[in-house]
Amino acid sequence: MKKQALVILVALLIALPLFAGDFYINLSTQVLIAVVFACSLNLLVGYGGMTSLGHASYMGLASYIVAILTTRYGMGHGATAIISIVGTTASAALFGLIALRATGLSFLMITLAISQVLWGLAYRMTSVTNGDNGITGITRPMPFGVSLESASSFYWFTLIVTAASFAAMATFVLSTFGSSLRGVRDQPRRMAALGYNPWMIRWITFIYSGFWAGVAGLLYVYYHKYIHPTSLSTTNSAEGLLGVIAGGSGTLGGPVVGAALVSLLKNYASGYIERWNMLLGIVFLLIVLLMPTGIVPGIRKLVGRIRGGQK
Amino acid sequence: MQFWIIQSLNSLSLGGLLFLLASGFSLIFGLMRLANLTHGAFFMLGAYFGAVALRTFDGLNFWVVAIGSGLLVAALGGLFERLVLRRLNTNPLGQVLVTLGMSFIIADACLIIWGGDPIPVPTPAYFQSPTRVFGFTFPTYRLVVVACALAVAIGLYLLLERTRIGAMIRAGVDDRQMARAVGIPVSRLFTAVFCLGAGIAGAGGVLGGPVLSAYPGLDADMLPLALIVVILGGVGSLLGAFVGSFIIGFIYTFGSALIPDLAYIILFLPMIAVIAFRPRGLFGRLNT
């Protein structure tokens, strides 16, 4: 039953450009990018118990590296993509080194401070980032000579990358390393006593999570062909976090559902109201107050209760 | 020479403003284990209240406005603490997320009500003429800001170290459960400290108005500086907030003046040094 539903969903996702218009194809592309981003954040928040408020840094950093290298230095897409991902992962390793000196709320504050510093840098260092004007004129890559200019071709490209990322992150979580990560989240002392190195496990997860956020950043900049300092803002980090928490952190499917809902809400709402931040804040309050464990675990509990009632 | 003196004074006044923001943040964090991300928004709200009051009612006393805005923001903070944060006291992560959501709501409300253009706050007339000492001219108002920060620092010190309430707060910071066990009304103390912190931030916003003016994004500019101050000085420590504020005030001001492109990177350095060698901060007692 569950498997069949999944097969139908995947088939629908693949076939979407055949029956939907450009608007909905582009919307779906944005949803997929948000999903990759939220899943990468979920590794930290849900499985590692490390709530980061600066995850947009890695997404933004990857985008900025591509934007600067291709527009200013005229470098090719293959090389820039690799440099961008390597650079982003390396900076995640560096920032992880700093932020993981602390845990809990101090960790959250340090990640927030670091991301705000990067955001400030993107705004002020106008000679490199072009400041508030952002960087325009970015092109999409042509993997194996295939043009990604049309909405549907870029959608399929994004779908492939999203599926690969999701599979890689799911494998990570379901592996023995994933179990030790959950162990460190719940019982760090016991894990240390068992001979594991909690710090190293957290750091590796931090780097891995930064890597996939970088992949989301590549998709983001290719999709928009434009980059602006707001991509590094706390609002963006918070959107990702809301997706994770609304869907259900620490579950594989939760962030997918949550990120999809958040980005659909954002797109839908922007047709009616001018400003998204107010709504984002209100949704945050409501989710935390009314549905602290998220939608997916909530529904699962509900289904369990109904089934239990039938017996 | 004039450059260095003026920039030092600017550093001191920025440090003073940061102290007004960071001291409340640090107290709240120390006592309630709550990273109040609404704090920057409280500061901005204070600045807007001050700007609007001083520009609509001519001849209104500046100090009355500052204290009035402080009280208003304190009341809002108290409501927020009682109605929302209180429900989440077993869920520290939820509390942080709610304060973040609240900061978005306040920032957006300010943008809707007062628009996107900066509203300058007029400097009180009697502070407009510069002060001359030893042949150097100083903008008087910045000296006043520093004096106010010092006054608040001394006031908070006396409150914490010399009064009964202060002793209760210190007990709560050191060991919340033990404090509860010996009969200290920790819950009421939480509300009081939250109001106090919000109030200082709100009044600080008015004081900062003539220097920074009220503009959308003021919260996002000030909050990270306050966070870095608290990380540097150590959470829950008044002395840490004080020393950290002036360190960051100097680094940020001179950084912006000398190498504007990299001012934000330089902010990083003291933070990294402290985190590497003394993760609890310069004067921190808590190991969170």
Image (cartoon, coloured by chain):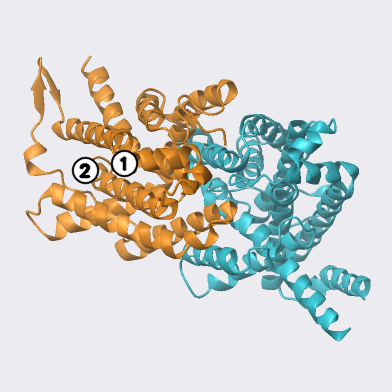
Chain colours: A cyan, B orange
> Quick one: label 2, few (<14), some, or many (20+) residues within 10 Å?
many
**What kind of residue is marked 2?**
Pro
For the residues labelled 1 and 2, the Cα–Cα distance comes to: 36 Å
Disc 2 target residue: B210
Left or right, B264 with reference to A262: left
Viewer can see residue A26: no
Q: Residue at x 51, y 43 (%)?
A: B178
Left or right, A119 with reference to B41: right
Disc 1 target residue: B164
Q: Chain of mark 1?
A: B
> Hey, which quadrant is residue B138 in on the image?
top left
Earlier-in-chain disc, 1 versus 2:
1
Foreground of the two, A92 or B84 = B84
Foreground of the two, A228 or A77 = A228
Is residue B254 placed above or below A234 in the rendered structure? above
Q: Chain of mark 2?
A: B
